Image: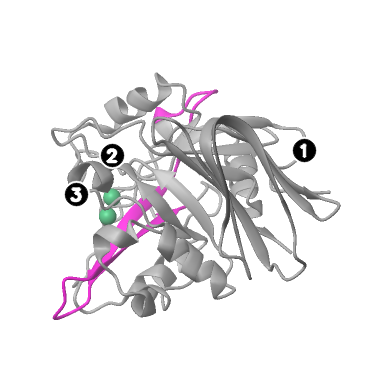
Amino acid sequence: MKSAFISGGKWYKGNTHAHTTISDGRMIPQELANTYKSRGYSFLAITDHRRYGIHSELQSDNFLIFPGVELDVVIPGTFEVHHIVGISTPDKNKFAHGHKFDYDGTKLTGKSIAELLADGGNYCIYAHPTWSQIRFEEFDKVEPIIGMEIFNYTTYLGGNTGYADAYFDRLLYDNKRAFCFACDDTHNNGKADYGGGFIMVKAEELSHKSIMQAILKGSFYASTGPEIKEFYIEDGIAHMKTSPCKTHTFYATNLRGFAQHVVGATEFSYKLNGKEKFIRAFCEDNNGKKAWSQPIYL
Ligand SMILES: [Zn+2]
Ligand SMILES: [Zn+2]
């Protein structure tokens, strides 16, 4: 059996993208941390624009802060931008708390900011590509990334540019390895943009190391509501088990999607055709809330 999630361990809820008054958010770091902690989250990354944040003083036994930042560039002469979130663990990150990234956003490229973050011990997540209006051929040049935001709540609320499913599939059909994240990109600028997009990580324990290892193994899913309880392949059949949903879909190589539309269903299966290089699971509930698994690579 090949499962997307580790066996054993526990589920931990987290948000990987958020801003504070240190950049253009309206909450001070303490308020932001309290907002998530009081909603049952286990971890949060504080990723202010061009200002590295560690914020270890906001942690407690049952709530972790991941170090992070968001960097941006513009493609000169276009409306296209690249925003990239870098997150890390306290032992891997090399940037100081408060480090200011001072650069001309028209001079650097998406790849160069991704490399800058990776050189500083951070893992790059490509932020809100639909909002960024980025052409796929530009998006595709940005590396190294561990994944991308398939859902970003604040851009969903602001301009309904929060979903990016087509970008994710394009990467996977091109045989790239990437994970999908759902996040809030919290600003609290007149809209309560928290609690709308999150990841659920199945990890051995609540520690930076364990959560990051689980993310890097793909033992997590992105969601705006539904639960993906299981996603695995056994005897050539892919299975997903979820909270009650109206649509379940598998996406894979050499497959134009495989869907079931049954209100209230909690499972769905697909017999592999043998040509799949990856397969991923997706579901949507009666309220239009969605969840996305990571790909299982074959
Ligand atoms: Zn952004
Ligand atoms: Zn942001």
Q: Residue 249, image x and y in percent? A: 57, 49
In the rendered structure, are the residues bearing label 2 and label 3 in contact, judged by CB atoms less than 8 Å apart?
Answer: no
Front disc: 2 or 3: 3
Relative height, residue 91 to residue 65 (above, below): below
* Residue at (31% x, 55% y) in the render: 99
Residue positioned most to the front: 262
Q: Which comes sooner in the sequence, label 3 or label 1?
A: 1
* Residue 278 colored in magenta in the image: no
Q: Which mark is residue 186?
A: 2
| Residue 206 visible from this viewpoint | no
**Which element is circle 1 on?**
loop
Under mark 2, the amino acid is: Thr
Asked whether mark 2 and ligand 2 are closer than 8 Å, the reply comes as: no
State the separation of the CA atoms marked 3 and 1. Answer: 39 Å
Front disc: 3 or 1: 3
Q: Which residue is mark 1?
A: 7
Q: Which comes sooner in the sequence, label 2 or label 3?
A: 3
**Which element is circle 3 on?**
helix
Relative height, residue 36 to residue 90 (above, below): above
Under mark 1, the amino acid is: Ser
Under mark 3, the amino acid is: Gly
State the separation of the CA atoms marked 2 and 1. Answer: 32 Å
* Residue at (59% x, 66% y) in the render: 177
Q: Which mark is residue 159?
A: 3
